Image (spheres, rainbow, N blue to C red):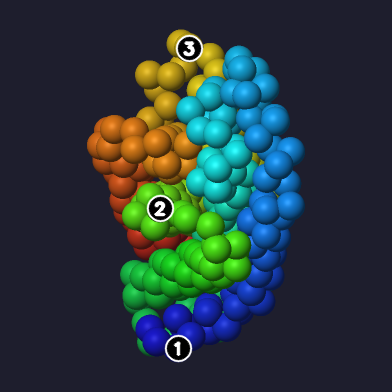
């Protein structure tokens, strides 16, 4: 199993570096731009907070973009959330199906390993990728805070990053299950799901009738504007997210073990 895990990590290392550095450096750049834009944002803060549905959707009605935490929550929070969920979807949606799509299954299935151990190694690889991605981005953001010398509530920041990791794990769990369905490249499906979850959360914060159902989407409990305003702990949303994650993993194990796989 170690050989499979090592092989998967090496194969996904390039993608990990590209995505983590891209999202991390973009977030760092936005943080460093805060000081040069601080004066203008103070004038814009009131206007942005009174833009109705737009303000509700991006949290500008509860946080001032003139403060660092408000700026981070509304700007970098959206960048990281969308970027990390897309990375999670890409990694998970291809990690099983690629064996048949690329015709490498003949080698993989000849190893003296059960299918369960193979898929377990792939699941660990996805978990490692998401954890390393989150750590790299966190370090970039911390460098930005230190460079600015501005006060940032670390407890809220770390809570945000932890919930983002859980959100990514949920998206990855769903895509992991879908990856076991067919031996074809489903990259577009994975990216589409990440974008759909993001769009659902934005729309749900604008449309009153959907607000009670926001917990269905993974972005609901990882929303930066709620975390940085100490909103109530989203127990229902997190429990539902963990349930979907476990269902995705369970389905992947079940389906991968029962399917006739092409070599």
Residue sitting nearer the eye, 6 or 206 = 206
CA distance for labels 3 and 2? 30 Å
Residue 222, image x and y in percent?
43, 43
Total marks in image: 3
| Mark 2 Cα shell of 10 Å, populated few (<14), some (14-19), many (≥20) | few
Q: Residue at horizontal 46%, vertical 11%?
A: 209
Residue 234, image x and y in percent?
30, 35
Q: In the image as oriented, which residue stretches furthest toward the front? A: 39
State which mark lies toward you, 3 or 1. Answer: 3
Which circle's residue, 3 or 2, is located before the other in the chain?
2
Q: Check disc 3 and report the residue beneath it.
A: 208
Left or right of residue 167: residue 79: right
| Mark 1 Cα shell of 10 Å, populated few (<14), some (14-19), many (≥20) | few
Residue 87, image x and y in percent?
59, 58
Which circle's residue, 2 or 1, is located before the other in the chain?
1
Quadrant housing the N terminus: bottom left
Quadrant housing the C terminus: bottom right
Which circle's residue, 3 or 1, is located before the other in the chain?
1
Task: Give the vertical position of 194 relative to 133 (above or below).
Answer: above
Task: Give the vertical position of 38 relative to 29 (above or below).
Answer: above
Task: Give the vertical position of 79 relative to 11 (above or below).
Answer: above
Q: Check disc 1 and report the residue beneath it.
A: 3
Mark seen at residue 90: none
Residue sitting nearer the eye, 113 or 168 = 168
Q: Check disc 2 and report the residue beneath it.
A: 153
């Amino acid at each position: 199993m170690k050989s499979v895990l090592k092989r998967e990590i090496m194969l996904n290392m390039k993608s990990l570096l590209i995505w983590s550095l891209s999202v991390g450096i973009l977030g760092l750049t936005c943080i460093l731009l805060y000081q040069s834009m601080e004066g203008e944002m103070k004038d814009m803060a009131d206007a942005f907070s009174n833009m109705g549905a737009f303000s509700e959707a991006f949290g500008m009605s509860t946080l001032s973009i003139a403060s660092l935490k408000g700026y981070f929550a509304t700007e970098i929070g959206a960048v990281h959330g969308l970027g990390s969920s897309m990375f999670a979807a890409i990694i998970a949606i291809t990690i099983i199906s690629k064996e048949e799509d690329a015709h490498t299954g003949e080698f993989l299935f000849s190893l003296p390993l059960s299918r369960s151990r193979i898929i377990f190694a792939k699941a660990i690889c996805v978990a490692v990728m998401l954890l390393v991605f989150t750590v790299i981005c966190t370090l970039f953001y911390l460098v930005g805070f230190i460079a600015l010398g501005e006060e940032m509530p670390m407890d809220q920041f770390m809570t945000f990053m932890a919930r983002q990791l859980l959100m990514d794990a949920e998206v990855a769990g769903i895509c992991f299950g879908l990856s076991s369905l067919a031996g074809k490249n489903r990259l577009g499906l994975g990216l589409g799901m990440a974008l759909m979850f993001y769009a659902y959360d934005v729309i749900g914060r604008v449309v009153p009738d959907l607000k009670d159902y926001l917990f269905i989407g993974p972005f609901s409990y990882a929303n930066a504007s709620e975390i940085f305003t100490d909103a109530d702990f989203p127990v229902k949303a997190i429990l539902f997210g963990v349930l979907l994650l476990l269902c995705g993993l369970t389905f992947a194990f079940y389906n991968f073990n029962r399917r006739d796989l092409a070599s």
